[in-house]
Image (cartoon, rainbow, N blue to C red):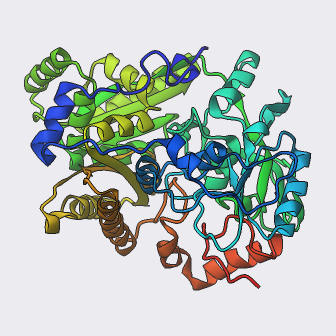
Amino acid sequence: MQHSARATPGASGMSPPARLPAAARRMLVDRLGHGQRPRDADPATIAAALPVGRLPIRMGVSADPADRLAHAAGESLPDWIARRAGRAAIVPDAVAHPGDPEDVQPLLAYAAASGAAVIPRGGGTSVVGGVTPTHSDRPILVLDLLGLAGLRSFDPHSGLATFGAGTTGPAIEAALGPRGWMVGHVPQSWARATLGGWVAARSVGQQSLGVGRIEALFAGGRVEAPAGTLVLPAHPASAAGPDLRQLVLGSEGRYGVITEATVRAVPLPDEERFPALFLPDWETGLSAVRTLAQARLPLAMVRLSGSLETSALLALGGRPAVSAALAAYFRLRRLPPSPCLVLLALAGRRRVVAAAEAEARAILSAHGAVRGPGAIGRAWAASRYGAFDLRAALWTHGYAVDTLETAADWSRLPALADAVIEALRGGLTEIGERVIAFGHLSHVYGSGSSLYVTYVYRTAADPDETLRRWRVLKTAASRVIVAGGGTISHQHGVGTDHLPYLEAEKGRLGVDLLDAVARTLDPDGMMNPGVLIPPRPRP
């Protein structure tokens, strides 16, 4: 089966339009007021003004100012603000583009001899500061790993596929699809993020309910650390001590450079469906999707949007006639004007998909759900990789958008969701600014669920003030998450943004344990300092 919704993200309508639909603009103006487009800096002018790098240049290492500037940040909102304003705090001194795994150890030795810090980088899609330089007391070398790409081997008997760590989502599926297989890991950054980045950030794909999170898919691989090479065999199971793969998962470049990874592939499904249903309210929705999760049906995804997010999704669709028809349909089916949208994904053998969909619909119908038009699910699947384009569209109208996420058990989740959204909506009242905040559940488990929250606020004329507003909102929400018993990160990683809250979740001993592993693999603390665990003083 060909997966057209996954084949060419960004082409033929997958990304939100550069110009926001009129309904979306009206919603923003009504709730936040008119925005004013920030003045963006010229990257070429910024690159031309960069000081000369502090690293001696050798073959395979670039000191080109434009190359250095392009590798100075990821995709967090602070990164976005700094890049647009031309205020990147720290720019790497050089960028290396290894084309072979054997190139990595010599580059680490070169960095060590130069006293440099090393930042491994794949697609640069971190939204928590995971690839952004944080300390300038030493030279900085970025290892761009996109050259370590491609299928290395595939065993159709075991379903094990080994790729270079720089292989992107589309390239993985393009390599396996003609063979009748896929990995099926589709995070929102799928089009740009790399396999090594998925492993390093402990990524979760949108259809993880079906294929599993990255820790279920990651079978083994190879890590080049300053202390040597760590080889992780792809055994189907082992009781030979603690699983070292779990140390690599979520390590965010602190322990070394992932150069290749073996993943568990699955046969392409015969059929893929994205049915949409509507529930009367959020509380009913929570009960319904909890029942679905605990029923353990063979579903690929269960996603519940709150009423405001549902309205926002329909407004972003940009089709007034469709919205009017839906409003009439809601009245006919005696739903409130702003119900909650439930999106399901099913993939597999046709008879299994049909049976699972029928059972899921029966469970949701018992909670008052009504069937939505099939086009809604298909439209969502076609546009689900457009987060970065949506951020750009909002920015041009004078609005900043960011997301945060957590996960909690079902008992804590309702209160935590209310508290996070309330903290965000009231976060800027001291300066008379309003905030739009809404959420959805995107990954459900038998014991709980993730909570994914989007928030939008007006940008200021001064980019420093725009950034300050973000810090106020992010801090308020993070404190509520920690106090409410949620994880500080369900799928985005720690980076620098979540570092202040890690000890609250791991405990002091847990953080010391992570640091002890780093000291073993990276004795001089040169790997991505400031990310995941606090940097230690240089000797």
Q: Quadrant of residue 116?
A: bottom right
Q: Is residue 398 above or below residue 464?
A: above
The structure residue drawn at horizontal position 90% and vertical position 63%, both measured from the top left corner, is 228
Q: Is residue 340 visible?
A: no
Horizontal side, residue 297 vs residue 180: left or right? left
Residue 82: horizontal and vertical position, in percent? 44, 54
Residue 501: horizontal and vertical position, in percent? 47, 73
The answer to which of 365 and 32 lies nearer the viewer is: 32
Q: Is residue 370 above or below residue 62?
A: above
Q: Quadrant of residue 56?
A: bottom right
Residue 308: horizontal and vertical position, in percent? 20, 42
Q: Is residue 94 visible?
A: yes
Horizontal side, residue 63 vs residue 212: left or right? right
Horizontal side, residue 203 vs residue 255: left or right? left
The answer to which of 485 and 164 lies nearer the viewer is: 164
The structure residue drawn at horizontal position 46% and vertical position 36%, both measured from the top left corner, is 301
The structure residue drawn at horizontal position 77% and vertical position 55%, both measured from the top left corner, is 257
Quadrant where the N terminus is found in the figure: top right
Give the mark count: 0
Q: Is residue 230 above or below residue 138?
A: above
Residue 50: horizontal and vertical position, in percent? 59, 54
Quadrant where the C terminus is found in the figure: bottom right
The answer to which of 301 and 426 lies nearer the viewer is: 426
